[in-house]
Image (cartoon, rainbow, N blue to C red):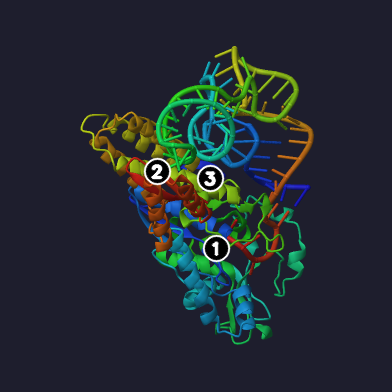
Amino acid sequence: MIRFYNTLHRKIEEFKPISEGTVKLYTCGPTVYNYAHIGNLRAYVFEDLLRRFLEYSGYEVIHVMNLTDIDDKTIRRSMEEGLSLKSFTDGYIESFYEDIETLNIKKAHHYPRATEFIPQMVEMVQKLEEKKHAYVADDGSVFFKISSFPDYGKLTNLKLEDLRVGQRVENDEYEKEEMRDFALWKGAKADEGDIYWDSPWGPGRPGWHIECSVMSTYYLGTHFDIHCGGVDNIFPHHENEIAQSCAASGDRFVNYWLHNEHLIVNGQKMSKSLNNFYTLRDLLDKNLSPEAIRYTLLSTHYRQKLNFTFESVSDSQKSINRLRELKRRLSLVENIEGDNLEESTSRLYHDFTQKLGSDLNISGALGALFTWVSSVFVLLDKQQLSKDGAVRGLKALETLDHILGVIEEKNPSLDTEIETLIKKREEARSAKNWSLADEIRGKLANMGIILEDTPKGTVWKRGT
RNA sequence: GGCGUCGUAGCCAAGUGGUAAGGCACCGGUCUGCAAAACCGUUAUUCACCAGUUCGAAUCUGGUCGACGCCUCCA
């Protein structure tokens, strides 16, 4: 049984797909005005775990992630850089795809760009207008009339009267009847240059919320299974999506809303002024491995704030090394006699999936994995593992890595300089020139390479 | 003011009524040229605090203290 915490009802519920065997999944994607930071990437890694686990559990997952390429920030930044909106956002979309690949995140089946769905958005706004859920303001903007939708506030559990009128509202330059109404379509403004589209209400551009409603519905229908995003999106973004979508279609829209908590760095909110704002590239430049970064983002439960530290990445690397060491040792087993691991691996599969099925309890799942890992190391040390068992163990590691995505190494090759050094050290060791051997080992350690001398030769691994 | 999350060993963290998983770190040992890895052993009578329910609570109830998030466009 698979259960998830559904923000809509604020409790853990059994997951049942709308049509058996298939899960329709929509995840809020990046606004492409900058490189993704590790907080963004945490969300994508969580969604990747969700998707991989659903697939592992036998579901076919249809995954859609939007790319927001039209909003205040993409407009402003592209104009500042003197680029067309498209060429500006193209660059960041490209680097987004690169980051996804680096972190071994499975690609969504569809990455719709907001600017490619303008006609559909206009159509949906028109529909809302016809149904009296929207009204046009003097400046050519169209707003959603919240008073026309009694269920508004259901996801957030907010009573509208209780909303505090904040300072941000005063900055709103659009004219609406009620403060709480939100823009479906924004009338063109002078300082936005030629970035506008024609519409029945004059030139303008879509509001933020409408894009997700349109693009999710386009690919997944008016009623689908799971919608994910960061907790900050619960209000207003997802609340507004529900209002628009349900008002337009009369359908239920989404069954399960899953939201990930934020990532903090060294106990503080990530921000440029605190100088703790990291993109993936920043971390790779510090010689951290993609797998260790992925493990760090993955290994904290998604509804828990993740405190990202360099120490935690280093710990992650060590955990991965332990798994890889087991893999290496298993591949050397030749014994005919011994434990075949049949019982322990089937228990592992059971425990691992049972934990993940419990609202993606990754810590519990990893606990089960490492308990098993230790037990296999014991058998290896005692030479009580059969070749049959070793094969079964390797298979288990490989299978679970389909979900974790951290054991298999993308670029296991070393550059020639390191290989030469290792060879040199081997020669020094055969000549019992220990001081030279140790000197080379120290040199490699400084380069982040740790050596282990085994009876069958020297192996290296990444340290951090 | 409203809504919500959280407080378990030095750090990360699972467990949500039956007597504290796992990872990292540390210490002692085996192994090793020395290391590393792996293994063996040690490491929370205790789960922020107080009271209550119960045969029994980290787990349920009430309260206190502390940290944090959201409340119009930030994953």
Q: Earlier in the sequence, mark 1 or mark 2?
A: 1
Q: Are the residues flagged by discs 1 and 2 from a single subunit?
A: yes
**Tag in front: 1 or 2:** 2
Residue situated in front as seen by the camera: A344 or A301: A344
Disc 1 target residue: A285
Q: Earlier in the sequence, mark 2 or mark 3?
A: 3
Q: Amino acid at mark 2?
A: Asp
Q: Earlier in the sequence, mark 1 or mark 3?
A: 1
> CA separation, marks 2 and 3?
22 Å
The answer to whether residue A255 is seen in the rendering is no
Query: Measured from the top left, where is residue A307 in percent x and y?
Result: 61, 48
Disc 3 target residue: A315
Q: Amino acid at mark 1?
A: Asp
For disc 1, the chain is: A
Does residue A280 lie above or below B38 as drawn?
A: below
The residue shown at (51%, 76%) is A91
Please tell me how crowded label 2 is: few (under 14), some (14-19), or many (20+) other residues with Cα within 10 Å. few
Please tell me how crowded label 1 is: few (under 14), some (14-19), or many (20+) other residues with Cα within 10 Å. few
Disc 2 target residue: A453
Query: Measured from the top left, where is residue A267 in percent x and y?
Result: 67, 49
Residue situated in front as seen by the camera: A454 or A238: A454
- What quarter of the picture does the N terminus of chain A occupy? top left
**Tag in front: 2 or 3:** 2
The residue shown at (34%, 45%) is A457
Residue situated in front as seen by the camera: A407 or A267: A407
